Amino acid sequence: MKRPWLPLSLALLAGCAQPERTAPAPPAVPVRDIGFLVFGDHGYHLDYLEAEDYEPPRTREQFIAAERRDWREDKRPPEEFRPPAMTQYRNGSWVAASGLAPVANAMRDWCDAWQCDFATMLGDNIYPNGATLGTDGRDDATRFETIFREPLGPLAELGADFRIYAALGNHDWKTSRAGAMAEVDYLTRTAPFYMDGIIYSVRPPAAQGAVELFVIDTTVLLGGQTVYEDALADDASELRPTRREDPDRWVIPKTRSERDMVAWLERSLAGSNARWKIVIGHHPLWSSAGSKYEQARVLRRLILPALCRYADAYLAGHDHTLELHYDDCSQALPRSTVAPLPAIVSGAAAKQRALNTAFMRHQLARYPELATDWASGLVWGFAHLTLSGDEATLRFVTTPDEGSGTTTLEHTARFKRRSGNAAVP
């Protein structure tokens, strides 16, 4: 696949082959287009900051200086530095601003003009430590109301069948397994949210059977693997990793379904007759900030063969950016002739993270299977997908730092449905 060119100015803004399986024939094309929201990492709220975020109080200049130090430590080009959106906390300290309310308002307004049949919520739904069962002295019922119902509840006005299909992220697992399950319970029983455990598939009613979502828990999946910590050289190229990540014991797969997650995903995708098969996880396959690539490397080894054979797109958050990549599947399925897999990152629904343009250049040079179509950092925003027959239109939308909730269409891309068309030796 020819690599699209990634403009620098835009960036600054911001396994072995297996026998082919024959999936069931897809159903008829729906009578109308299907549209849905894609957003992740929305759960950053100033009512739930950690003390280190605001104590001791920092002036605006001190906040910017700390951000500049982090920028240098992350090996980003110094000349590209700019701070994230910022605001004053109740004690006067300057902190990173939250885009939770502005993005929620922007999505609601966007859906007045664009078809929104459902939404996908890509994890890190509660910062910083998920539901705590009161161990932080805070009531989870209030936390759920503040982070879920108040900002996102108005989306229910979009229709009786409108649902927000959710995955969990690493921050949702921070305190305990019981805390993560408390969040799952809330999202299971509280409309317009929807969960059916941490691993599930569902066909949104408004899509008339044409779309099936396959939700996996990538935190638990990676918890059962050896994952190394990221390390960059001074030029932002990847260093050979030496230190292993140490996952919390409660994210290590415990149940049969958790240990069987990869096999479940392949079986479920292969057996589905949905026209569009969309896989949802929290961790991305590819991203551009330079701090998630070791996790992505392991994730590609685990799930990319199944995605390349059967899926139409993979949606993730984790990096607080907006990005579209294509993986040509040549590493996952050698000698195959499948179409490239769209790998979408939409993790900018509350926090902002900068791209590392130096890392991006090294990543594109090192991995010929990767093509980066578009990426933007230090923004708040979301994505919107429209499915028309066998073509998808992906739109990335941002909302300004001043918090108005207005929308700007930043980038549009189109790709074809690829499931059912695999040619695997």
Image: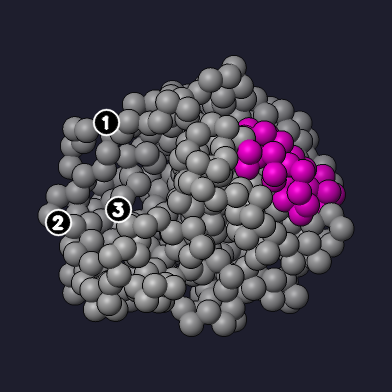
Residue labelled with disc 3: 290
Q: Amino acid at mark 3?
A: Gly
**Residue farthest to the front, as pictured:** 137
- Name the residue: 74% across, 56% down: 118
Residue 186 in the magenta stretch? The answer is: yes
> Residue 202: x, y in percent?
74, 40
**Residue farthest to the left, as pictured:** 234
> Residue 24: x, y in percent?
76, 31
> Residue 350: x, y in percent?
50, 64
* In the displayed structure image, the side of residue 9 where residue 25 appears, left or right: right
Disc 1 is placed on an element classified as loop
Residue labelled with disc 1: 244
Disc 2 is placed on an element classified as loop
Any part of residue 382 in sight: yes
Which region shows up in magenta?
Answer: 182-209
* In the displayed structure image, the side of residue 364 where residue 86 appears, left or right: right
Q: Along the polypeptide, which appears first: circle 3 or circle 1? A: 1
Scheme of colours in the image: one colour
Q: Quadrant of residue 55?
A: bottom left
Q: Amino acid at mark 2?
A: Asp
Any part of residue 2 in sight: no
Q: Nearer the viewer, residue 100 or 418?
A: 100
> Residue 317: x, y in percent?
49, 52
- Name the residue: 18% across, 70% down: 78
In whole angstroms, how far apart are the C-alphas of marks 3 and 1? 17 Å
Nearer the camera: disc 3 or disc 1 = 1
Circle 3 packing at 10 Å, graded few (<14), some (14-19), many (20+), is: many
